[in-house]
Image (tube, helix red, strand yellow):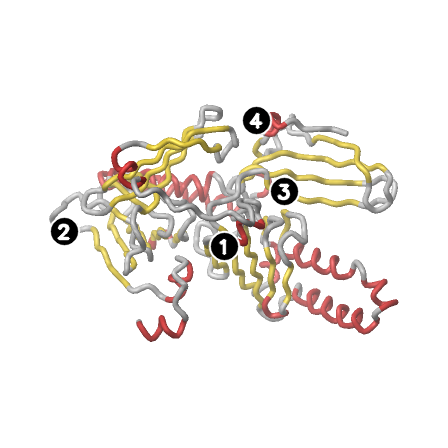
Amino acid sequence: MSVIAEDSVRGSVFKDISADDEDGQPTEIESMCMNCHENGTTRLLLTRIPFFKEIIVSSFNCDNCGWSNTEIQSAGRIQEKGVCYTLKLKTKQDLNREVVKADSATTRIPELDFEIPPFTQKGSLSTIEGLLDRAVAGLEQDQPVRRAIQPDVAEKIDEFIQKLKKLKDVEHEFTLVIEDPSGNSFVENPHAPQKDESLTVTWFTRTSQQDVLLGLKADDDEDNEPAGNDLETMRNEVLVFNTNCPECNAPASTNMKLVQIPHFKEVIIMATNCDSCGHRTNEVKSGGATEELGTKITLHITDPSDMTRDVLKSETCGVCIPELDFELGMAALGGKFTTLEGLLKDIKDMVVGKNPFVSGDSGVEDRIQKLNEFGKKIDQIIAGELDVHIVLDDPAGNSYLQNVYAPEPDPEMTTEKYTRSFEQNEDLGLNDMKTEDYQEEH
């Protein structure tokens, strides 16, 4: 039996997927076949996919009976929030979208009242069509036994299987929902960097029950209230606590400080530095509660000096560049306190440099070209060569863009306050109020 030491699954062992990496060969382990109980071969590949951190791809094959099985497991950390993808499938082309589905994800097709509960399937890297085929195969697995013992039940399941298979013809629009409390699932946007009108992505705060299912807390754990002097301590000094690097998972330290932003409010800035791999993160969280009104800030970029403006983008803030038909959803980049230039570079890095479905071996030539053109346009904006507007839309009202003319009005910047919709309140976790009560009040 082969054993992988704990130290060996960190650092350089998790490598980026590349066809040019001849050393990136899978590890082969002799293991028992669960079908015929003879010995087969399991191949393990420890790799890193941008957006999903480290993953373990395992593939089993039995030469004796021909049985094979492939699955994917996350080797990275559980994300701060859960994620829910809602996709409207309208054409057969939508079936080719690639999907990373973690084993903690729930898959639903509301039109058929069909649901695959979490932890009933292993994680997979597949397509929408592959997910449907896997669901059909799971239902067909015990049908011979059912036909002999419960023929009525088997007949009904056969009818349902035909409905699932019929979905692949996409004669009518249907919905696929993937809800993952770990935040490690992903559905491809083939129109990137443009917004995908058929795909809705929402981030949510996990419930205590979901934290228990993910192993983040025990059943009897209770949230401890912070000490009364914690806020004052954070104002006066930098707090340091131990954590793990989000890239290589090595022990690291995180610094936390409460900072007052002029003409705005207090925010919590968290910075993590990893001595092992050199990775650095800068994350911002609002120091106050959600504002009564949402905020939309629009800046007309007219000069390269605009790139030096300070930007506070909260984790609930979306970013839009109308001239590029580009929209970045809330939570996509997390909370950041940076400059406008830094924000644009982060957008370019996320959309172009770290997009697993439009780079490397999985990229399609015309899509790669479109993404590269988007990256060049971002460079032109930074250099002041492109006349565009940038819009920060934060329903929580906790984002900020520096007014360089303060306290006078900024002629190139407008700030609009608006009442949140019921759906936005749902996204922010402000769902204590019933729908009819909310609509009556607003």
Q: Nearer the viewer, mark 4 or mark 1?
A: 1
- Mark earlier in primary sequence (3, 4): 4
Instruction: Name the residue tied to disc 1.
Output: 207
Q: Residue at x 56, y 57 (%)?
A: 178
Residue 409 — which label? 2
| Proximity of marks 3 and 2: CB atoms separated by less than 8 Å | no
Badge 3 amino acid: Gln
Instruction: Name the residue tied to disc 3.
Output: 73
- Mark earlier in primary sequence (2, 1): 1
Instruction: Name the residue tied to disc 4.
Output: 12
> Rounded to the nearest whole Å, what is the CA distance between mark 3 and mark 2?
52 Å
Badge 2 amino acid: Pro
Q: Residue at x 35, y 51 (%)?
A: 319
Residue 137 placement, left or right of 201? right
> Rounded to the nearest whole Å, what is the CA distance between mark 4 and mark 1?
35 Å
Q: Which of these two is toward me, 105 or 111? A: 105
